[in-house]
């Protein structure tokens, strides 16, 4: 069956892909967790989709990015279904589930949405009105034709314009209260998912459903987590709450129309108290929480609770009979409920949570954030204990083994098994296996890993003259064709400015000069182009071919020392008798380094150099851990060797272009 699927997708069957499919099928059958590292080019999506279709119960596939989700739903699955449609006993039904805000909301489109005072507002005026009207017309056409109402299929628009035709969970009336509940795109997507054998969703919805206990996905037997190196970060993000005085004020204003007593005014006063306490507090992680801030949070919590209690029990629309939903009341009450829930969590001061204050900026005022200190316990208890989970990515082995990633999601190194075992889900032992199916790429022949050992260690002041000179020499040797991955926007911009001045014959782009898709298109279109940027380029850019023959990494991407969550996790690991630096900071750096280095070799014909300008990779004790997490390229510390190799590659590419 795998062979038929590969042929239908126009590919060739690979040894690693076959090994992966067999391992995934065995894990599903034996109810045993599996971590499988499958390098770029392995064809790992078919390696789990084929066993998922054959499995006798529903399977959920969760991705980290909408791009991969789109690839699975729009390309891989339709072709796979066509290839195996004649195979007896195979249920090829599939559906996609996304977060609520990814679908158009018919209630908002047809009835408007209450503003802060509960008054329904109509289509906005000005330049965005035309686009919003187009989106409304599109949504009505989708409803009439049975379309999905997904944002991916909508006319071109901005985030701000899309918010005029969609809602988040807070402002949703719910299917039973909404007059358009039977047509609701979200509800129809859920109904389709209940009828489907395979459900494609994202890490966040998987976390909300399994870890938070909010039913979002129909019951399933197996979860396949693609891009699994992102899972912990996405689960953490889904479990993170924020609160600002403006949130409290907004809830208070929206309540004034519905609450007869002084409770809404008391909530507004609590917002002022919170603002004063936040103004006195220093940005960063609180350990412990200042007394004034703790008192303010308790005041907001209590005021929000009282305001909720003051809401009328029967939700009636003005002039309407009982049972007709008042959208203003329902959504205003929902905003107060969210304030109460978040303030209660922050005021609790749980050691399982980390609370911090962001600095804010010109357009973004300071906000309070609360996130779980760890998520592995929740994932173990609420996901891994009940379901069989397959985790896959091109980057799952850090330091040469799976233990780090396994531990981060709740699997213990001692539970790893080599052979077949019978699994009893009532036991506390959760057996798992790890498999590296390799890569179709010959990294030792296709790539050079260069560590600039002769450079001074990076300092806090950004790039120094030696680093800037090294970058310029490497880019010059490559005649462009360089992707620069930097630890900060300031470093990327400084490098771009220096290269523009020193190498004016090349086109040098910096992240922020235009939207990322536009920058990527320009980078691909002209080989004599250099693109410098930060985190979104480390993981989200796929540029195979001669376009990219040099990947520059300015420094080991350790988390910032003042990162609230990372510093708290590092401190907790030290307190538990572990090595916080290695368990948290080095692991974070290893993942990013592996992802960054992975930008270079995307096909079997790619050639190039990954240049790390941080000598600590070669000199520090933790360097071996980081190096063993990278693709096994030929390694050197000689800059002359690297420049000559880049020059040869550039000359070869130019010759082929002619």
Image (tube, rainbow, N blue to C red):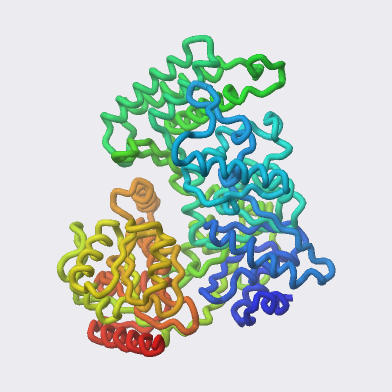
Number of numbered callouts drawn: 0
Name the residue at 22% across, 74% down: 503
Name the residue at 62% across, 46% down: 138
Q: Position of residue 69 (x, y in %)?
A: 59, 59
Q: Position of residue 343 (x, y in %)?
A: 45, 29
Tell me if residue 563 comes above or below residue 307 in the rendering: below
Judged from this view, the residue extending furthest toward the left is: 465
Look at the image and tell me in which quarter the N terminus lies.
bottom right
Look at the image and tell me in which quarter the C terminus lies.
bottom left
Please state if 104 lies on the left or on the right of 398 as rendered: right
Q: Position of residue 515 (x, y in %)?
A: 40, 57
In the rendered image, is residue 283 in sight?
yes
Pick the front one: 208 or 63: 63
Quadrant for residue 17, please give it.
bottom right
Q: Position of residue 507 (x, y in %)?
A: 29, 70
Quadrant for residue 635, please give it.
bottom left
In the rendered image, is residue 583 in sight?
no
């Amino acid at each position: 069956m795998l062979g038929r699927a590969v042929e239908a997708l126009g590919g060739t069957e690979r040894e690693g892909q076959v090994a992966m499919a067999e391992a995934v099928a065995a894990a599903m059958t034996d109810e045993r967790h599996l971590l499988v590292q499958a390098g770029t080019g392995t064809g790992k999506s078919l390696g789990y989709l084929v066993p998922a279709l054959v499995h006798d119960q529903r399977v959920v596939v969760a991705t980290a990015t909408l791009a991969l989700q789109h690839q699975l739903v729009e390309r891989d699955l339709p072709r796979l279904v066509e290839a195996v449609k004649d195979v007896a006993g195979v249920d090829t039904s599939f559906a996609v589930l996304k977060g609520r805000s990814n679908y158009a909301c018919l209630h908002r489109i047809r009835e408007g949405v209450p503003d802060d005072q509960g008054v329904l507002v109509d289509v906005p005026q000005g330049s965005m009105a035309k686009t919003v009207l187009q989106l409304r017309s599109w949504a009505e056409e989708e409803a009439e034709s049975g379309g999905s109402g997904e944002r991916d299929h909508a006319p071109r628009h901005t985030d701000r314009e899309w918010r005029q035709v969609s809602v988040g969970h807070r402002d949703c009336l719910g299917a039973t209260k909404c007059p358009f509940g039977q047509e609701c795109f979200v509800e129809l997507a859920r109904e389709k998912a209940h009828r489907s054998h395979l459900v494609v969703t994202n890490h966040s919805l998987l976390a909300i459903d399994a870890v938070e206990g909010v039913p979002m996905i129909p019951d399933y037997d197996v979860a396949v987590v693609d891009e699994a190196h992102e899972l912990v970060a996405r689960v953490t993000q889904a479990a993170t709450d924020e609160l600002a005085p403006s949130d409290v004020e907004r809830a208070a204003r929206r309540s004034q129309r519905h609450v007869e007593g002084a409770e809404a005014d008391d909530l507004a006063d609590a917002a002022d108290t919170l603002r004063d306490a936040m103004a006195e507090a220093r940005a960063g992680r609180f350990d412990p929480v200042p007394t004034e801030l703790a008192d303010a949070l308790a005041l907001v919590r209590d005021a929000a609770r009282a305001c909720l209690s003051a809401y009328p029990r029967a939700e009636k629309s003005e002039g309407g009979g009982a049972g007709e939903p008042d959208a203003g009341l329902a959504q205003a009450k929902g905003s107060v409920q969210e304030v109460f829930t978040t303030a209660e969590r922050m005021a609790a001061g749980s050691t399982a949570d980390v609370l911090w204050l962001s600095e804010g900026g010109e357009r973004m005022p300071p906000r309070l954030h609360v996130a779980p200190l760890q998520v592995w316990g929740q994932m173990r208890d609420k996901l891994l204990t009940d379901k069989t989970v397959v985790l896959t990515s091109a980057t799952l082995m850090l330091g040469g083994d799976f233990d780090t990633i396994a531990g981060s999601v709740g699997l213990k190194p001692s539970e790893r098994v080599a052979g077949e075992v019978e699994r009893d889900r009532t036991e506390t032992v959760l057996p798992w296996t790890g498999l590296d199916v390799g890569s179709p790429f010959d990294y030792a022949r296709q790539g050079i890993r260069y560590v600039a050992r002769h450079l001074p260690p990076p300092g806090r002041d950004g790039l120094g003259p030696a680093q800037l000179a090294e970058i310029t020499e490497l880019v010059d040797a490559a005649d462009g064709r360089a992707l620069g991955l930097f630890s900060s926007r300031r470093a990327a911009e400084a490098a771009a400015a220096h290269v523009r001045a020193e190498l004016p014959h090349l086109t040098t782009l910096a992240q922020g000069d235009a939207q990322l898709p536009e920058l990527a298109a320009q980078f691909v279109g002209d080989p004599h182009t250099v693109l410098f940027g930060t985190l979104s380029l480390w993981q989200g850019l796929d540029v195979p071919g001669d376009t990219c023959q040099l990947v520059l990494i300015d420094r080991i991407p350790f988390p910032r020392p003042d990162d609230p969550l990372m510093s708290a996790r590092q401190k907790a690991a030290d307190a538990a008798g572990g090595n916080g630096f290695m368990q948290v900071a080095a692991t974070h750096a290893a993942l990013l380094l592996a992802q960054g280095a992975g930008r270079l070799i995307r096909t079997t014909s790619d050639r190039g150099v990954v240049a790390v300008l941080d000598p600590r990779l070669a000199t520090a004790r933790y360097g071996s851990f980081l190096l063993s997490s990278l693709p096994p390229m030929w390694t050197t510390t000689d800059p002359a060797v690297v420049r000559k190799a880049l020059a040869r590659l550039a000359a070869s590419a130019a010759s082929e272009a002619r």
